[in-house]
């Protein structure tokens, strides 16, 4: 039996209510507080008889503040669960909810059928078991990942996945604020789509890259052409493809990637009216080829989102640059996110190099990776780890050590000879120290904070600043 009690909100009233049930030795199995007006107490007592309820009802009415007592068919939470379960049962697409660890919390019958298990066995199963090629851990770690139209295959059947994050209250959108996600799988036949969907990639929002990831998230809802600027191998293509999967249009539209060939960018002849068109490395085109591309772009649908990538926006001809003048974003090179490089290297090793298995990086190797400039960025780091993995596996090792990694053939490209011409060694070092301190005190005005970061005493920092005529506030 279930009971609804309407009462005033006063201290001790719940204790008095529960004491009455205890006096009559009635076991209350569950309960809820609140209701639409916040003045309800709901109790479930499965073993309570009708005669017992009549007696308890009279006792409850004698409690100051209780206004009404009545029997109800379901508790509010039970009703919501029943209604949601009924709704999901009639949804033909597989729908499931997963927690932060990737375990299925609930699923509808269509999801159970897609996974090939009975409905009662779905809760508690790991999503990775059914989607082995999907980066579930990263998908559930943060918001800055593809959300719409992710192509997957489950037991030979193709789906496009949309996922909605479940955020913790208080700080939605922050790192670690995800409690889980709801996924919807829409069946689709790949033969119906002309364009080949790019591989969905997580964006690895480490260090300064997180700001770029969140910026991309905001830009995905817009329609203006976007220019993505970054060095070779910094992830421009990954971000361009992620823009497509971050847009709700990904559930029903195609993504086209065009790569320069023989100095030209040839647009597909089968472009649809909606979707995303990615133009890669437009800076490699000659001025004439860029003008020719501009003429072709004038004939495509305005509903097709344009995304271009380049290493240098200055190399884009003014007429074409005008098309991408509204929205632009820059990606940081790896040398600018040194604190995150060890973590990034371990992530690359785990997700991008299948043969690595459970291999880890030794501390010495992580330090070497952190010190290198990585002129080819992700491309160079991935190849470096691949070569080290092969060497480690060949010797039967369990972790990548210094003996496994190749020697760095590319050193830091600094203009020592031209810049230091006519200066002594001491003068060059003083110039470098002055420039370094000038740059650091802009963001760290506290000399104590600066000393802690540099690993030297506060007095030493103060003397150096005095020597070069620089000033910083003391805290």
Image: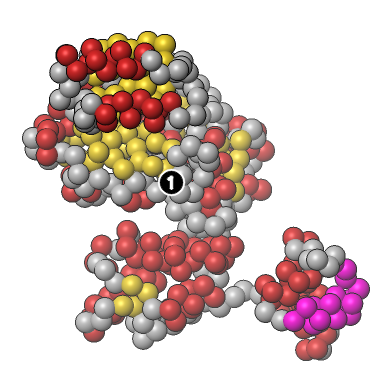
Asked if the magenta segment contains residue 188, the reply would be no
Residue at image x 38%, y 42%? 179
Q: Is residue 378 left or right of residue 464?
A: left
- Count of labels in the image: 1
Q: Nearer the viewer, residue 96 or 232?
A: 96
Looking at the image, is 76 positioned above or below residue 18?
above
Asked if the magenta segment contains residue 463, the reply would be yes
Quadrant where the N terminus is found in the figure: top left
Quadrant location of residue 388? bottom left
Residue 17 x, y percent position in the rendering: 35, 25
Looking at the image, is 96 positioned above or below residue 450?
above
Q: Is any atom of residue 469 visible in this view? A: yes
Quadrant location of residue 244? top left
Residue at image x 34%, y 17%? 60
Q: Is residue 131 left or right of residue 11?
A: left
Residue 79 x, y percent position in the rendering: 27, 19
Q: Nearer the viewer, residue 84 or 53?
A: 53
Q: Is any atom of residue 254 visible in this view? A: no
Residue at image x 81%, y 75%? 434
Q: Is residue 200 left or right of residue 264?
A: left
Residue 62 x, y percent position in the rendering: 38, 15
Q: Is residue 111 left or right of residue 266?
A: left
Looking at the image, is 385 positioned above or below residue 212?
below
The residue that disc 1 covers is 142
* Residue extending farthest bottom: 425
Residue at image x 75%, y 63%? 444
Q: Main secondary structure of the magenta part?
A: helix
Q: Nearer the viewer, residue 396 or 475?
A: 475
- At mark 1, the secondary structure is loop
Q: Nearer the viewer, residue 244 or 29?
A: 29
Tell me where the magenta segment starts and ends, as one range. Answer: 457-472
């Amino acid at each position: 039996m279930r009971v609804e009690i309407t009462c005033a909100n006063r201290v001790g009233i719940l204790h008095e209510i529960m004491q009455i049930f205890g006096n009559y030795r009635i076991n209350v199995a569950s309960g809820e507080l609140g209701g639409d007006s916040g003045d309800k107490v709901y109790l479930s007592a499965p073993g309570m008889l009708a005669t017992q309820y009549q007696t308890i009802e009279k006792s409850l009415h004698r409690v100051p503040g209780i206004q009404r007592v009545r029997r109800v068919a379901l508790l509010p939470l039970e009703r919501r669960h029943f209604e949601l379960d009924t709704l999901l049962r009639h949804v033909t697409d597989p729908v499931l909810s997963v927690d932060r660890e990737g375990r299925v919390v609930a699923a509808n019958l269509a999801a159970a059928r897609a996974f090939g298990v009975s409905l009662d066995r779905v809760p508690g199963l790991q999503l990775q078991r059914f989607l082995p090629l999907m980066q579930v851990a990263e998908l559930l770690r943060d918001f800055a990942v593809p959300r719409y139209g992710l192509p997957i295959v489950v037991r030979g059947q193709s789906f496009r996945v949309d996922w909605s994050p479940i955020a913790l209250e208080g700080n939605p959108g922050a790192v670690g604020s995800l409690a889980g996600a709801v996924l919807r799988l829409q069946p689709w036949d790949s033969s119906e789509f002309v364009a080949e969907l790019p591989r969905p990639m997580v964006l690895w929002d480490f260090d300064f890259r997180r700001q770029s990831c969140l910026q991309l998230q905001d830009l995905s809802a817009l329609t203006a052409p976007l220019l993505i600027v970054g060095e070779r191998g910094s992830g421009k293509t990954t971000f361009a493809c992620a823009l497509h999967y971050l847009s709700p249009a990904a559930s029903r539209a195609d993504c086209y990637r065009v790569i320069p060939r023989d100095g030209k960018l040839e647009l597909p002849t089968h472009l649809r009216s909606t979707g995303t068109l990615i133009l890669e490395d437009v800076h490699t085109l000659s001025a004439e080829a860029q003008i020719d591309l501009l003429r072709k772009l004038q004939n495509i649908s305005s509903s097709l989102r344009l995304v271009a990538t380049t290493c240098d926006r200055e190399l884009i001809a003014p007429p074409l640059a005008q098309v991408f003048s509204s929205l632009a974003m820059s990606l940081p090179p790896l040398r600018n996110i040194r604190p995150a490089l060890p973590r990034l290297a371990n992530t690359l090793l785990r997700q991008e190099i299948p043969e690595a298995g459970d291999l880890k990086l030794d501390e010495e190797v992580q330090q070497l990776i952190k010190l290198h400039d990585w002129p080819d960025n992700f491309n160079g780091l991935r190849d470096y780890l691949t070569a080290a993995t092969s060497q480690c596996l060949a010797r039967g090792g369990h972790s990548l050590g210094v003996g496994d990694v190749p020697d760095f053939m590319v050193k830091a490209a600094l203009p020592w000879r031209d810049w230091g011409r006519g200066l002594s060694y001491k003068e060059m070092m003083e110039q470098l120290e002055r420039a370094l301190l000038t740059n650091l005190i802009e963001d760290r005005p506290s000399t104590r904070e600066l000393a802690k970061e540099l690993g030297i005493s506060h007095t030493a920092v103060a003397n150096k600043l005095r020597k070069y005529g620089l000033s910083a506030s003391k805290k």
